[in-house]
Amino acid sequence: MFISTRKMRQVKHRKCLGVLLVLLIVLASLFITGCSDFVDHDQITIVPEQTLVLDSNNTVGQTFVARHGGLNGIELWLKSQPGSTGVLRLYLQPEPNSPSNLAIAELSLETIEDPGFYRFSFPPDNSSHGVYRYVFLELEGSGTVHVATASGDTYIDGAAYRNHKPLDVQLTFRLIYSPLGIVLEIGRTLVEWTQLAIVSVFLYLLPGYSLLVWFNFHSDSILIRIALAVGLSLAIYPLLLLWTDLFGLQLGILYAWGPVILGTVILVLHYWRRYSGRVKGKLQRDWIRSASFWPDLTLVVIISLVFCVRLLVVRTLDAPMWGDSYQHAVIAQLLVDNGGLFTSWMPYTPYQSLTVHFGFSSLVAIFSWMTGVEIANATLLTGQIINVLAVLTLYPLSVHLAKGNRWAGVGAVLIAGTISPMPAYYVNWGRFAQLSGQVLLPVALYFILDIMHRERFSWCSILLAGLMLGGMSLHYYRMPFYYVPFILVWLVAWVLLEWKTNRYRLPSMLFQMALVAVCALFLILPWIKYVQGGRLAKALIPGITFSTVSAWEKVLADYQIWRNVFWYVPWPLLGLVLLTLIWALIRREWNIVKCFFWIIGLSVVVLGRLVQIPGTNLMQNFAVLIALYIPVSLIVGWLIGEVSQRLSGRNMTILLLVLALWFARGQINVVDPSFILVTRPDRHAMAWIQENIPNNTRFLVEGFRIYGGLSAVGSDAGWWIPLLAKRENTMPPQYALLNEVAIELDYSQRVVDLVAHLEKYTPTSPEGLTYLCEMGVTHIYIGQGQGKVGAGAIQLFSPEVLIGSSDLQLLYHRDRVWIFALNRDTCVR
């Protein structure tokens, strides 16, 4: 009996899926039943001179945070004194000084023969991921045991304890997990990530996709439309906040649900009429059997992998990292508190204007409105989601530059998502405003190229391009300086390559591009009332003249960072860029050559300061270097597209997925603990402050001066006190300090002067106490980071200095966190 080719393919696919499913089940079974416990290297540093001695009269303990499910043991580095006898007993508790024991484990002293790690096992806790725990050892018998330790900064989420009192050291330990607990945790995590993906689709995809449908924008690839829709969605939210504020509307949660509901209605009405009852058949006919199946499938898998890796690296963080995250989070919290845009930063910091970009913070606010997630975690999750979206939106532009080769788009996503250190590394800096702007940039460039290549005038394309440019500018004020060099390079290339044969197109093209600019300016017009008179507006006015020596010095100093280009773009990747450029020149693929000149254009923007080009004072070469992954990915993506022409679709899929899995391993370790401000001990302290400290208090917190002493930033979790503990502190968000109008005229300068003062005088000195009283300080906070988090950070005041003062009272000490109160009579002498 004759069997059709299509049926044979379906049978073959079913067999392959069945075999794959069986293999996965077998591998999972082997992993669960046959693998040994997983040993995590939490704190394995040893400093011999800091060893703690355990005897029958003292206990030694350690607090920690479990990183996985299935916690079933801990290994401690021990050295027993010869002749010691008895039993070491380990107690597992929820926290120090807890009245209850979660588990007890014992180890005979006679088994400790050689110095090394020794395991204490207890029943597995399959829900241990992210939990805070305390273990302590007691010795029942004679002799002593040396417990290895290291300095306090070798582990961020706990501290060693002697007799249940914290020390500024860490035990040397490794946590043990059961494979079954890890597998169960992974299952729960995948469910959570699936829910997060669904929320992301509704918030960051659906509104923009409905806009494409409304404007009847066509593309052969649904994945191109999805990527374009992401950019449009992100552009909508800050513009919506801006224009509703113009009419005095504060919509609150409707900013999240409004675009989603309206977009859903538009899409349902559109697709119900066209595809009702035929979607499944259309999918089988038009996609599964098409030439686009393999590249599309590969793209979906790689993006899914990038999504999982981006979330994996932050799953145990207690707040977003470093300084930029804090200011984004404060703005987002104020958006939520006010139900829309605001001018007053109270009660978090005493400022009364808003002149900085707020696009990313608007994304955090709508995420919090829709999910109910608190702002700190919403900032962290939103930042990682847009990190994925910044990779996805490269796809349509790359395909366009490669003249429809979808493998080039997949290649660009592969490079940016798994191979390049950027944008994954942004998580360490919290540089989410620039990142959200870079989500929009490729989409904005796609639409402007669409206009340049269209033969007919299209209002829809102009409006979409204007929407992207306007929204992009609200996400990050530097984005036009990435956008304009791209357009200039393309215009110059068009004149050189097409002027003779198509010169009549130039006036129309320039006219449409001017309309795009007018549209963008109109959309952000209400923002003028916010920025006028602010520092950001003043920075647009050239402040450096061509003739001054200092101008050259400042510009040359800014270019020094290019010496580190191989850190931002590793040399193998740069080598591929040069190889691709040579091949593109040979093939006369001018789109790729233009991308190379775009890099050159970006690199010379800072030189605009020398000739007083407005706004170039805002640019810096660091901002260019960390954005180079965009042109680099586009260029190398085209080379991957060239390779695809010599391989079958299935082989290309296998090759790229193997590369993605291989390089994704390196991105798992992208988080650098040295950038972490807020830890679990700090979170506990924040909760304690809310419960025990009155509202009308102000905390002195650690910080250091930057920008040649002109400004200051926080250097441990004390910076986050206004947001996490709802109390005032002495260190405002950097955006406010640099750009906004203080309620008290000289407040910003006094903040910087306080840090400078504490560099000379301790808080307990007469000079220091006088200044604290003038600043209204009532309490002092030293976080787990001890005021040492940040490049150039130097601890202003140590616990040892504060403890001995009669003017201070110790209120809280847990792990490495200290809270002191100024005595009531200190400031009334």
Image (cartoon, grey):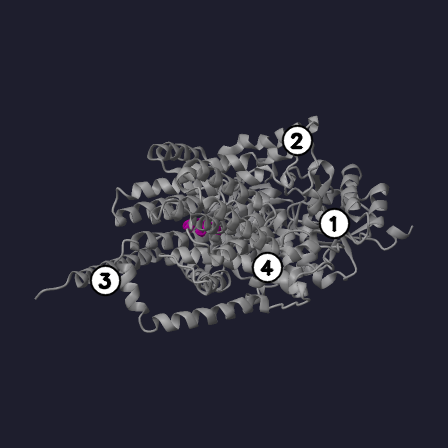
Whether residue 186 sits left or right of residue 98 in the image: it is: left
- Residue that extends furthest to the left in the rendered view of this protein: 1
Residue 288 x/y as whole percent: 28, 59
Secondary element at tag 4: helix
**Helix, strand or loop at mark 3:** helix
Query: Disc 1 or disc 3, which is closer to the eye?
Result: 1
Crowdedness of circle 1 by 10 Å Cα count: few (<14), some, many (20+)?
few
First in sequence: mark 4 vs mark 2:
4
Residue hosting label 4: 239
What amino acid type is highlighted by mark number 4? Leu
Q: Which of marks 1 and 3 is nearer the N terminus?
A: 3
Q: Which quarter of the figure is the N terminus placed in? A: bottom left
Query: What span is colored magenta in the figure?
Result: 390-396
Residue type for callout 1: Gly
Q: How far apart are marks 3 and 4 (CA)?
A: 48 Å
- Give the class, few, some or many, for how many residues have Cα within 10 Å of label 3's Cα (few <14, many ≥20): few
Please tell me the numbered disc located at residue 533: 1
For label 2, the residue is 554
* SS of the residue under disc 1: loop
The residue to which callout 3 is attached is 14
Q: Nearer the viewer, residue 732 or 794?
A: 732
For badge 2, the amino acid type reads Lys
Query: In the picture shown, does residue 622 fall above or below 660?
Result: above
**Which kind of residue does numbered mark 3 sit on?**
Arg
Secondary structure of residue under mark 2: helix
- Mark 4 or mark 2, whichever is nearer to me: 4
> Which callout, 3 or 4, points to the residue nearer the camera?
4
